[in-house]
Image: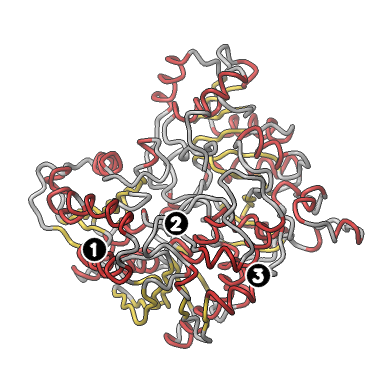
Amino acid sequence: MTSILGISAFYHDSGAALVVDGDIVAAAQEERFTRKKHDYSFPTNAVGYCLEEAGISPADLDYVGFYDKPLIKFERLLETYIAYAPIGYRSFRKAIPLWLKQKLHLPREMRSELPGYSGKFVFTKHHESHAASAFFPSPFDEAAIVTLDGVGEWSTSCIGFGRNNKIELLEEIRFPHSLGLLYSAFTYYTGFRVNSGEYKVMGLAPYGEPRFKDLILQNLVHLKDDGSFKMDMSYFNYCQGLTMTSEKFHRLFGGPPSPPESRVTQREMDLAASVQAVTEEVMMRVAHYAHKKTGSANLVLAGGVALNCVSNGKILKNGPFEKMWIQPAAGDAGGALGVSLFVWHQLLDKERHTNGKDTQHGSLLGPQFSDDAILKDLTATGAKYESYEDDDALCERVTDLLATENVVGWFQGRMEFGPRALGARSILGDARSTKMQSVMNLKIKFRESFRPFAPIVLKEHVDKYFELDSHQESPYMLLVAPVKKEIRNKLDAAHESAFGIDKLNYVRSSIPAVTHVDYSARVQTVDQERNELLHKLMSRFFEKTGCPVLINTSFNVRSEPIVCTPLDAYRCFMMTDMDVLVLGRYVLLKVDQPNRMSEADREQHLSQFELD
C-alpha cells in the first residue's frame, strides 16, 4: 500500500488530501475545522482527519507533497521588490519576516507537524499541482489542460496536455501579468474583499452593462488573439504596495475604490460587467489556442479563475471542445490533491485507468457523522427533534416541508471538498417560490440582496429546464447555462428594460428563485450514483410537485466557512431564520426549539465576525 499526503498552506485556503494506491481517500480544507474563513495556516486538522479516515499515522506515509516551490516563489518576491525599490518597503517589511521564519523552512515545518514521518518531501510547481488536479481525476484519457489563477511561483496561466498517466505544461503567462489578479483588482476597486469577493463580482455583473470593457482593453490589458496578454502595471499597485490599484487606475475609472460594505451603485455593476466580459473573452481565446495547440477534443480546467462558472459555461457552449471537466476544488486547496496525484502517476509512473467517469467521488471527501454521534450532540444541546427509521420516511417528511416554502438545512454524509456545497452541507429551498431568494439572502445568509442562488436539478431532467444537452453533467456546480425559453415568463417592454438592481423585481421563470436577472443559472446536476439520498429526496419532490429543481446554497452564513460538524450546523440553524434542520435521520423544526436565539443575541453573535 502506497500512501501519499498532499498539503497546501501559507497563502490562503490551506488544505490536505490523501491518496492511497491512486484512490482519493480523503480531502478537506483547514477552514472547516478552525472556523476561520480562508484559513491559510498549516492544515493540522485537515491532515489529522485525512490520516484518521485512512486509519494510518504519519509514520505510515510513503510520501508527503507540497503544492508549490517556495524557493522559486521567494525569488519572485525578491525580484519584484528590487524592481520597484524603494517603493514597496512597507509590503517588504511585512512579508519578509514571515518568509524567513517559516515559509523558507517548509521541510522543518511539515516534519514538526507530522511526528513519526521519516520520508522525503516532494515539491511540485504551483501550476503543475493545479494541472494534476484537473487532469488525473478527470474522465478523459487525454485532454488539453488550462490553469488560470492569481499567481503561483511565476506562472499565472498555463496551457498543457495530459495523456494517460502524464501531464506536460507547454506554455505560460508570467507574473505580474495575471487574469486572476486583474479580476481581483476590480474586486478590490468595487468594494469587495480580494480572494473571497470575486464570486460576488461575477454575481453582480448581470445587473450592469460592460461599458468599461473597451477602456480595460485599450489601457489595462493588451490582449492577443491566442489569449496571451500583457498588463500596463502603472495602473496597478499589487507588485509594490498593499493595495491592488493605483491612482492612475482610479483616475481612469473616475474615482477612488468603493469603501468596503458601501452601497452598490450602477457604477459598480457596470465595472463588474466589464471585467467579467474581459475575462470571458480572454478565457475563450485561451481555450481556442489550447485546442489548436493540443488537438484534443477534451478540456480540463483548474486554478481560481476556473471557478468563474459563467466563463466555463460559455466555453462549453461556444468553444472548440466537445467535453470539459473542471476540478471542483479549483483553488489553492485543490493543489493538495494535485500534488498527491502527481506523485502517484507522474513520479511513481503508476497506471491510470478511465471509464468515462471522474474519480473525484462526487467531491464528497470530508468527515461524516453517524446517527449515534448526531444524537449525542442533539441530546447535549437540548434540541427537540423528530427521528425517522429509513430514508423513504425522511424524504417524505422533508419533501412536504420544502413544498410549503420552508428553508431546510441539509446535513448528510461526507462533507464536500472545494468551495461549493453539493448536497452534503447545503441549505435547500423551493425554486418555484417568488420570495425565496430575498428570504435566503437577507434572513438566512445575511448577505447582499443581489446575490443569485444556484439550482440543483435531477440529471435526467436537466435539458427540460436549462440549455444543456441531456447527457451533459454538471455535478460540481461549475457551469452556468441559460434557463430554457419554454419556462421563461413573458415580460413587457418596461420590465425587460429594467435597470440595475430593479431587475430583481420581476419573476422571470417558473423557477424564479434560481433564475438570475439575465436568465442564467449556475447548474448542479444530481445523480443517484454520486448522491443517492439527495437524488431520492429530489425524486420525491418531483413526484409531489412536478418540479425536479430545488435551490441549493452552502450551509453557512456570511463570513463563516461551510459547516463541518453537527454542532456547527445546529449553531448556524439557531442563529438564522432557517425553518428546518435535517441532521442524518433527525428533523428539527425551529418552532419546537426551546432555546431559540433572540434578534438581539443573533446580532451580537454576528458582530464578532468581520464581514466579507
Q: Which residue is mark 1?
A: 74
Q: Between 281 and 414, which is closer to the camera in this rendering?
A: 281
Q: Amino acid at mark 3?
A: Phe
Residue under the point 62% across and 77% down: 318
Where disc 2 sits, the SS reads loop
Above or below: residue 92 compared with residue 594: below
* Residue 344 in sight: no
Q: Amino acid at mark 2?
A: Thr
- Report the coloring of the rendering: secondary structure
Gap between marks 2 and 1, in whole Å? Answer: 20 Å
Above or below: residue 532 compared with residue 519: above
User: Of marks 3 and 2, which one's residue comes earlier in the chain?
Assistant: 3
Where disc 1 sits, the SS reads helix
> Is disc 2 in contact with disc 1, using a CB cutoff of under 8 Å?
no
Specify few, some or many for label 3: CA neighbours under 10 Å numbering under 14, 14-19, or 20 or more: some
Q: Between 269 and 594, which is closer to the camera in this rendering?
A: 269
Q: Amino acid at mark 1?
A: Phe
Specify few, some or many for label 2: CA neighbours under 10 Å numbering under 14, 14-19, or 20 or more: some
Q: Which residue is mark 3?
A: 212
User: Of marks 3 and 1, which one's residue comes earlier in the chain?
Assistant: 1
Instruction: Mark 2 vs mark 1: give the one in front.
Output: 2
Gap between marks 3 and 2, in whole Å? Answer: 21 Å
Q: Which residue is mark 2?
A: 243
Spot occupied by residue 556 in the image (x, y as percentages of width and height): 52, 37
- Say which quadrant the N terminus sits in: bottom left
User: Of marks 2 and 1, which one's residue comes earlier in the chain?
Assistant: 1
